[in-house]
Amino acid sequence: MFPKVIQFGEFFLPTYGLMVALGFFAGLQVAIRLGARRGLHREVITNLAIYCALAGLAGAKLFMILFDLRDYVSGERPLFSIATLQAAGVFQGGLILAVIVAFWYMRRQNMSALTTADALAPGVALGHAIGRLGCLAVGCCWGAVCDRPWAIKFTNPEAEALTGVPLGIPLHPTQLYETIAELIVFGFLWWRHGKPHREGEILGWYLVLSSALRFWIEFYRFHAQELPMGGPWSLTQWISLALCGVGAWILYGRKQFQPIGDGHMR
């Protein structure tokens, strides 16, 4: 694949970082547009997005370290290294910390948390879809061995050095699976936001759909560590189930909210 955009000596611009940045700006534009429909100012949405992005990066790295704590404690993987800094991290960890920071910020700004989250959710899905293309470029988050016609093989030694992805072996393109899944989620949320909906409904749909799809994709991901509790599911799948449950509660446990929105796309 193409893990580096440009390189000067030992310094290089990773393709993953570039795609994450593009995903952030694309998602931000969506959030600004949807937020404007609910009277949310551009500056407030931009500040919130920046806070969430920083929290998301920190949360993704923190969960990555927790998931592979044994390797970091043993010294097999150095904690303070360029490789750790450039690693993709765990998306759910970033999402959880970003949500916590978002609600803290919205509370301080006296913003309607659920209405604001409804404006942000479609942009998060779009940004996630674009960011996964960066994972594909660098080779991280690779899939299990695959015998299907659409299997992919990584051949770039730099990708192996950066992420450890095996070379020359047909693998499930789980990065593309997730990109396609999140684009579908984005399309649905964008459409649904333009229809009358209850406060928090868009957020609920995002959590349910994105988490359910991630749960399914995890069956085709490569897992180096033993599954927790000796069960059939990975830790990421357990987190997906929890987030899906939160989304279902928002959708079906908060029916006291009245529909909002004029039903027209602008």
Image (cartoon, rainbow, N blue to C red):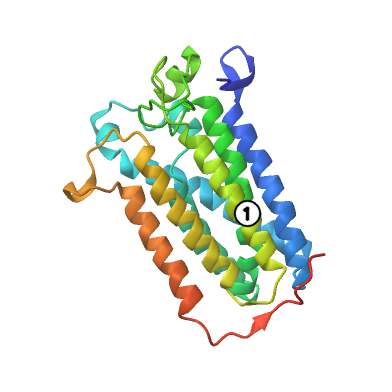
| Depicted 157 relative to depicted 180: above or below | above
Q: Is residue 186 left or right of residue 170?
A: right
Q: Residues within 10 Å of mark 1 (few under 14, many from 20)?
A: many
Q: Residue at x 39, y 22 (%)?
A: 164
Kind of residue sitting beneath label 1: Phe
In the depicted view, which residue is nearer to us: 41 or 125?
125
Q: Looking at this rendering, what residue extends furthest in the front direction? A: 149
Q: Is residue 190 left or right of residue 137?
A: right
Q: Looking at this rendering, what residue extends furthest in the left direction? A: 230
- In which image quadrant can residue 168 be found? top left
Q: Residue at x 38, y 37 (%)?
A: 221
Q: Looking at this rendering, what residue extends furthest in the right direction? A: 266
Q: Residue at x 57, y 73 (%)?
A: 200
- Locate the N terminus by quadrant: top right
Q: Is residue 179 left or right of residue 50?
A: left
Q: Secondary structure at mark 1?
A: helix
Residue 115 position within the rendered picture, expressed as x and y whole percent measured from the top left: 64, 73
- In which image quadrant can residue 69 be found? top left
Mark 1, residue position: 186
Q: Residue at x 48, y 20 (%)?
A: 159
Residue 101 position within the rendered picture, expressed as x and y whole percent measured from the top left: 53, 61
In the depicted view, which residue is nearer to us: 21 or 27?
27
Residue 67 position within the rendered picture, expressed as x and y whole percent measured from the top left: 32, 42
- Locate the C terminus by quadrant: bottom right
Residue 91 position within the rendered picture, expressed as x and y whole percent measured from the top left: 47, 47
